[in-house]
Amino acid sequence: MNIENTQSQMRKGILEFCILSIIRRGEAYPSDIVEEMRAANLQILEGTLYPLLTRLKNADMLTYRWVESSSGPPRKYFSLTEKGETFYRELEQTWQELSNGVNALTSQTQTFPETSTNQQ
């Protein structure tokens, strides 16, 4: 079994939740999202982020506005819609349930059932 593949799948499963968590705090520019994710040791490429933002926008979870920039083209800043806020709260509840369950399972002392060596 390939550990890198398993780790990648685990990260993908929480990526949307993490991105929405960042945007929920206030308008966010994509490169700022990438920087914040990296600062949290959650690597993401812009090639992964932009399609996800577009999908969330098309699902009415996000909206954006253009902001003029003095150092180049206008920038697109994303924010949560009301539907996105509701979706986020549902993801947050799911995360809490999963996190609590995983913590409960992984914090227990490992025990193995006794095996019988008697054969009849």
Image: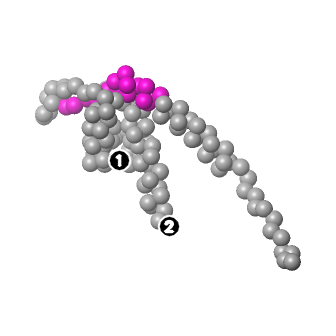
Callout 2 touching callout 1 (CB < 8 Å): no
Number of other residues with Cα within 10 Å of mark 2, as a class: few under 14, some 14 to 19, many 20 or more? few
Query: Which residue is rendered at x = 67% and y = 44% of the image?
Result: 104
Query: 24 or 61: which is nearer to us?
Result: 61
Asked if the magenta segment contains residue 81, the reply would be: yes
Sequence order check: which comes first, mark 2 or mark 1? 2
Q: Amino acid at mark 2?
A: Met
Region in magenta:
75-89
Numbered tag placed on residue 1 in the rendering: 2
Q: Horizontal and vertical percent for residue 60?
A: 31, 29
Asked if residue 106 lies in the magenta stretch, the reply is no
Going by the image, does 97 lie left or right of 43? right
Q: Quadrant of residue 66?
A: top left
**Could you tell me residue 51's position as x and y percent?**
27, 43
Q: Which residue lies at the image location 42% right of the left edge and 30% below the top edge?
A: 87
Is disc 2 placed on a helix, strand or loop? loop
Quickly name the residue at label 1: 44
User: Is residue 20 positioned above or below 41 on the image?
Assistant: above
Q: Give the residue furthest to the front.
A: 120
Picture layout, residue 100 above or below residue 67: below
* Residue shown at 35% from the left, 26% from the top: 80
Tell me, yes or no, if residue 30 can be seen here. no
